[in-house]
Amino acid sequence: MLKLLIDENFDNTIIRGLFRRNPTLDIVRVQDVGLSGKDDPTILEWAAQEERILLTHDVATITRYAYDRVRQGQSMPGVIEISTDAPIGQVIEDVLVLVECSQAGELEGQIQYLPW
């Protein structure tokens, strides 16, 4: 099962729904690890060091920094971009499918957009 890092402004309703469906998920929030207010490159670096996939609603800047890491040959375990106007139930299902069915390292260098 994949390990996740949840971006600072991520919808807590989704997080609660994920834990209700699968309480064994390995999820930490940016706030939980002292990264509140840090810039995107710092968050992506921490995620890479901890081998965690970043879940975010930030389509404006994270994507660029994630691809910068890939171009520079740096580790980028993956980013899952989630639309803020997507139905919450569908988002929870899609995230669970990705997390529970993917192998470690499978999303390396990739950005996935949900809902599909």
Image (cartoon, helix red, strand yellow):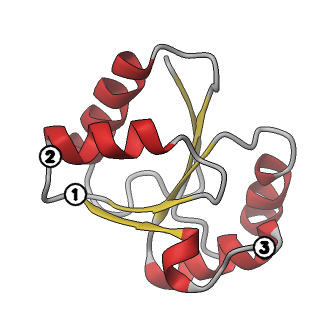
Q: Nearer the viewer, residue 64 or 12?
A: 12
Query: Residue 112's spot in the image, x, y percent?
Result: 55, 36
Q: Position of residue 93 (x, y in %)?
A: 29, 25
Secondary element under disc 1, as helix, strand or loop, is loop
Which residue lies under the disc numbered 1?
25
- Position of 60 with respect to 104 (left or right) is right
Q: CA distance from mark 1 to mark 3?
A: 25 Å
Res. 72 visible in picture:
no
CB under 8 Å between discs 1 and 3: no
What residue type is disc 3 on? Gly
Q: Residues within 10 Å of mark 3 (few under 14, many from 20)?
A: few
Provide the residue designation for mark 2: 22
Q: Front-most of 74 and 26?
A: 26
Q: Secondary structure at mark 2?
A: loop
Which residue is depicted at the point 15% across and 38% down? 21
Callout 2 touching callout 1 (CB < 8 Å): yes
Label at residue 100: none
Q: Amino acid at mark 1?
A: Leu
Q: Is disc 3 placed on a helix, strand or loop?
A: loop
> Residue at left 80%, top 63%?
71
Residue drawn at x 13%, y 59% as measured from the top left: 24
Mark with earlier residue (3, 2)? 2
Instruction: From the top left corner, tell me how far across and down residue 50 is, in percent.
Output: 46, 82
Q: Which mark is residue 37?
A: 3
* For residue 80, above or below residue 76: above
Q: Give whichever of discs 1 and 3 has the lower sequence position.
A: 1
